[in-house]
Image: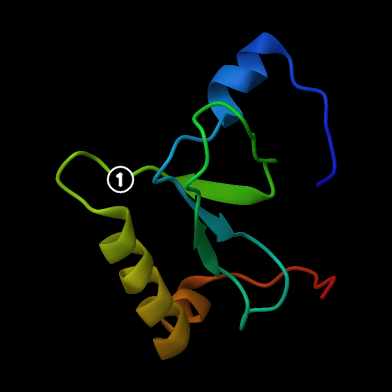
């Protein structure tokens, strides 16, 4: 795992909590919005701004939200609304 320096303000913004879902923001249209659920200790890890964090509310289960995101990825829903600029994949 690579390390980065975060200011206290950035730590508040980018710290991960159990159940957070991280979505890939870039690369090719086929890979945009791949997701993963964070299930480690709260505040132990942070994410960089090349990812999108989805934090489910109390009425939404992380596993369900990730299944929806996986379906949207497989069905092309994400690539249908994504805009391709450059690819580093």
Q: Residue 28: x percent and y percent?
A: 70, 78
Q: Quadrant of the C terminus?
A: bottom right
| Residue bearing mark 1 | 56
Q: Please give left or right for residue 41 compared with residue 9 in the image.
A: left
Q: Residue 61: x percent and y percent?
A: 24, 53
Q: Residue at x 61, y 83 (%)?
A: 30
Q: Please give left or right for residue 4 compared with residue 9 in the image.
A: right
The foreground one among 84 and 13 is 13
Compared with residue 21, is residue 89 higher up or lower down, i.e. above or below? below
Q: Residue furthest bottom?
A: 75
Compared with residue 80, is residue 34 higher up or lower down, i.e. above or below? above
* Mark 1 surroundings: few (<14), some (14-19) or many (≥20) residues within 10 A: some
Q: Residue at x 62, y 59 (%)?
A: 25
Q: Residue furthest front?
A: 41
Q: Residue at x 55, y 18 (%)?
A: 12
Query: Residue 11: which quarter of the image?
Result: top right
Q: Residue at x 60, y 70 (%)?
A: 83
Q: Residue 82: x percent and y percent?
A: 54, 71
Query: Residue 66: which quarter of the image?
Result: bottom left
Q: Please give left or right for residue 34 compared with residue 6 in the image.
A: left
The foreground one among 87 and 17 is 17
Compared with residue 43, is residue 45 higher up or lower down, i.e. above or below? below
Q: Secondary structure at mark 1?
A: loop
Q: Residue furthest left?
A: 59
Q: Please give left or right for residue 65 compared with residue 77 in the image.
A: left
The foreground one among 7 and 88 is 7
Compared with residue 28, is residue 76 higher up or lower down, i.e. above or below? below
Q: Residue 85: x percent and y percent?
A: 74, 68
Query: Residue 3: which quarter of the image?
Result: top right
């Amino acid at each position: 795992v690579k390390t980065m320096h975060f200011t206290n303000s950035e730590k508040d913004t980018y710290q991960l909590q159990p159940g957070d879902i991280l979505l890939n923001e870039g690369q090719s249209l086929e890979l945009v919005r791949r997701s993963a659920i964070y299930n480690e200790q709260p505040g132990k890890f942070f994410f960089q701004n090349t990812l999108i964090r989805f934090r489910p509310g109390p009425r939404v289960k992380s596993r369900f939200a990730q299944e929806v995101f996986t379906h949207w990825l497989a069905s092309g829903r994400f690539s249908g609304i994504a805009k391709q600029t450059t690819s580093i994949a």
